Amino acid sequence: METFVQSVVSGILTGSLYAMIGVGLTVVFGVMRIINLAHGELVMLGMYGAFWGLTLWTLDPFVSILLWTPLMFLAGMLVYRFLLKAIIPGGELNTLLYTAGLSLLIANLALFVWTGDYRTIKLPYALLPMRPFGIAVPIPLAIAFGLAILITEALYLFLTRTDLGRAIRATSQNVEAAALMGVNVDRISMVTFGLGSALAGAAGVLLAPSLYLYPTVGEILVTKCFVIVVLGGLGSVAGAIAGGVLLGLVESLGAVYVSVAYKDTIGFVIFLLVLLFRPSGLLGVGKS
Amino acid sequence: MSRAAVAGAVALLLAIPFLTANQFLLHLGITVLMWTVLGVAWNLLGGYAGQVSFGHASFFGVGAYTMMILYLKVGLAPWYGMVLGGILGAVVSLPIGLICFRLRGPYFSLATLAVAEIVRLVALNWEALTNGPVGLLITTLPQVGFGSRSLNWESKAPFYYIVAFLAAGAMLATYGLSRSRLGAYLLAVREDEDTAESIGIDTVRAKVTVLALSAFFTGLAGGFYGLYFRYVDPDAVFPIALSVEMVFMAVVGGLATVGGPVIGAIFLVSVGELFRERFLVGHLIFYGLFMMLTIRYLPEGIWGGVRRALTTHASARHL
């Protein structure tokens, strides 16, 4: 029983961060129909941001997130404006291949500049896990969980309560109709891509103290991310949150009750089954 | 392209091992040719049928492991193993195709990515068969004699000719496909799948067939990889990066052309290897960069761009 509770807890903690990465991918897909293969690299950049912030300026990752998130937002907008914008009219497969190129470019630049060494972030206050009710909860993951919930909640309020957020959702539902209602689709796309990148970067900063850092870590993360957004339905924010938590749970429970070696396989198998039988996602809210 | 040009290219290709004893150049030639096979094989599916697969590493890995396992456990000569590796790659592709081809466009791509990851994880964990992350190693290759002389496996020349033969075979298959009924079906599928279906083309069958052909050559290349490097492990032959690099050969060179992936392989692998020789890591920077530049400025690839420039130049001269 204790094992079960333990794996549920760690599943939800990790899942909250997966959810954050997934939400970034899914809003970008919703508005621009781009499946951003470079999304994992944006997370990787966030992780390295946290690492260098701590190493060079002894900035705690949970503080430097305040610096990296807006920077990633800006970087995302620039990437959209100067790189992606011209590609989008070429169709979904073109953007898919283009972002594959971008992903390889970023990951290998990082490999070139920062080498392939595995790095870790050690926080002095987080060497031992907390033990409420006998369940081990790693401190950095707990803080990250809290912040992830905060950020996701803020995003949700932004999308539902502000004009800009409503414009983003309108574009996501129907580009032409949104444009007819006076929404500047180009501007919305730029903001959305910035938003997606900021979420990826922020999630990277939050994940950094709990994972190994290496330049090609994005490859694994982005494949997990696809599992998440397809589970929840591509384009659906609520679906991505549910999908993220679900994948976290599947992985941690799978590792305990099925096999550690095959825990990642379970996610992919579910992914395939959902793609085949419920392409609109488990919640049925996404657009296929 | 004229026959003379083809004959000249083939002659030059065959002569290279006689012209140079430089091991690096020969290694570069072998690597370029191996990637040519992969790019050409991927292009059969991705270029002609328009189905972007991000999972071709599965077939490569299956080919490599088939050859290694048959040689190490049964003692089957590697060249037979290589051919069987191609065949097994094609066999494995059938269920994968039947599953993934139910999806279209980017969804197909994501599904192939997931399948490839599943295959990689299975190879990593099925230790009884694959020896897991430790990998498999061939210490000596069997003797092959031509009359009184035996083949020198320590030199690179035999490998060069083997892979040149594979590349030529893959290109011939592409040429044959592009002039066949199946090729025409595939173009119809690529341009508009619903219309192709409505005029009576069995689209799933056409796609599964070309995937099997593509997987066959990818598997052969995998078998060759095992023969040449004599060592395989799951990270070397099943990674996502390998699937993605194959795509780059074809797209940068020119989709749906016979020569495109060759140009792509020569160009990308040469740049990449020269960079790697100097800096060790990060040679894929250029792959990413050239991919982005190609899609933005030269959507028909280097080969397509050159061909267009030549034809417009020629027609301008006639005017």
Image (cartoon, rainbow, N blue to C red):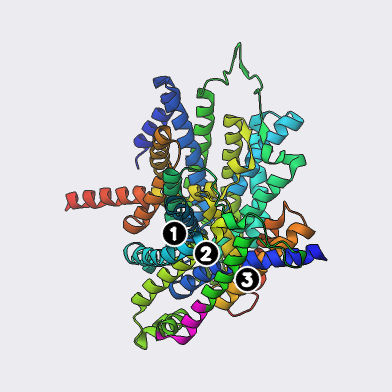
Which of the marked residues, 3 or 1, is nearer the chain's N terminus?
A: 1
Q: Disc 2 to disc 1, how far (Cα)?
A: 20 Å
Q: Please tell me if label 2 and label 1 are on a single chain.
A: yes
**Quarter residue A142 falls in:** bottom right
What kind of residue is marked 3?
Gly
Residue A12 seen anywhere in this rendered image of the structure: yes
Which x, y percent locates residue A56? 43, 50
Query: Do the CB atoms of the residues marked 3 and 1 lie less than 8 Å apart?
Result: no
Q: Disc 3 to disc 1, how far (Cα)?
A: 23 Å
Q: What element carries label 1?
A: helix
Which of the marked residues, 3 or 2, is nearer the chain's N terminus?
A: 2
Rate crowding at label 2 as few (under 14), some (14 to 19) or many (20 or more) other CA atoms within 10 Å: many
Report the disc number at residue A243: 3
Front-most of residues A35 and B258: A35
Query: Do the CB atoms of the residues marked 3 and 2 lie less than 8 Å apart?
Result: no
Q: What stretch is highlighted in magenta?
A: A154-163
Residue A3 vertical placement versus B137 (above, below): below
Q: Please tell me if label 3 and label 1 are on a single chain.
A: yes
- Subunit of mark 1? A
Of badges 2 and 1, the one in the foreground is 2
Front-most of residues B231 and A164: A164
Residue at image position (76%, 54%) is A259
What kind of residue is marked 2?
Ala
Which x, y percent locates residue B7? 39, 33
Residue, disc 2: A203
Looking at this rendering, what residue extends furthest in the front direction?
A: A125
Residue, disc 1: A99
Q: Disc 3 to disc 2, how far (Cα)?
A: 16 Å
Rate crowding at label 3 as few (under 14), some (14 to 19) or many (20 or more) other CA atoms within 10 Å: many
